[in-house]
Amino acid sequence: MSELVVGFQVGQRVTVMEGPFMTLEAVVMEAEENSTTAKGGIVIFGKTVGVTLTIGAESRVIAEFDRSEEIARHAGATHYYGIVGRVVAGADAGRCIRVDRMQDFAETPEERALAKGDMIRIADDPAMEIACRCEWVEDWAAVEETLLRDGHRVDWQM
């Protein structure tokens, strides 16, 4: 019978029961007393990966990538949702770009509750119809990270 998890303690080892790290062991690195979330680490191929640990239904531990640094790094960024811009640097220079919130396309409150993330669209035309390429990301911080990764600079005032 598995032990009932109430909160996390620094140094505690837990087995992840759900999420992309299912079956791996995580070590709690930062935790508040009786909190159902904590920061931890999972060793993958000899490297520690930061994760956010959460106690889910039936006290099952869920682990997801810790994105707190990424989110903090882009906290002051202006969000250009639904605005067509022009990529001025990077492999897609000259192409159009638009970022949409998936929530904005949901038609019912139930769909809105389930709609997560943002869609980055890059195409040859402002209508996003010709040679359109899409990439789903979690939020605007991930949009900024994706633009940096691809070497894109965008003119949102086109």
Image: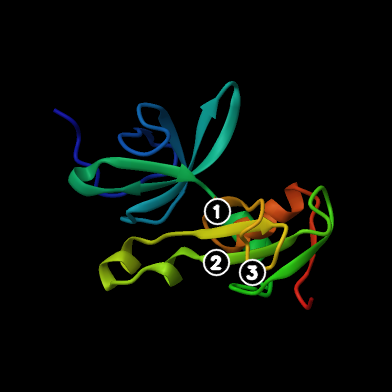
Name, please, the residue furthest toward the right.
Answer: 89
Task: Write down the quadrant of residue 109 in the picture.
Answer: bottom left
Task: Write down the quadrant of residue 61 in the picture.
Answer: top left
Task: Indicate the position of residue 96 as horizontal and vertical percent values.
Answer: 73, 63
* Residue at image mark 2: 100
Q: Earlier in the sequence, mark 2 or mark 3?
A: 3
Q: How far apart, in angstroms, are the residues tagged by discs 3 and 1?
A: 16 Å
Q: Determine the secondary structure under disc 2.
A: strand
Q: Is residue 158 left or right of residue 122?
A: right
Which label belongs to residue 37?
Answer: none
Which label belongs to residue 75?
Answer: 3
At x 68% / y 61%, what residue is drawn?
73
Rendered view: 80 above or below 26: below
Q: What's the residue type where badge 3 is placed? A: Ala
Quadrant of image for the N terminus: top left
Q: Is residue 42 left or right of residue 83?
A: left
Name, please, the residue furthest toward the front.
Answer: 130
Which label belongs to residue 137?
Answer: 1
Eye-nearest disc, 2 or 3: 2
Q: What's the residue type where badge 1 is placed? A: Val
Quadrant of image for the C terminus: bottom right
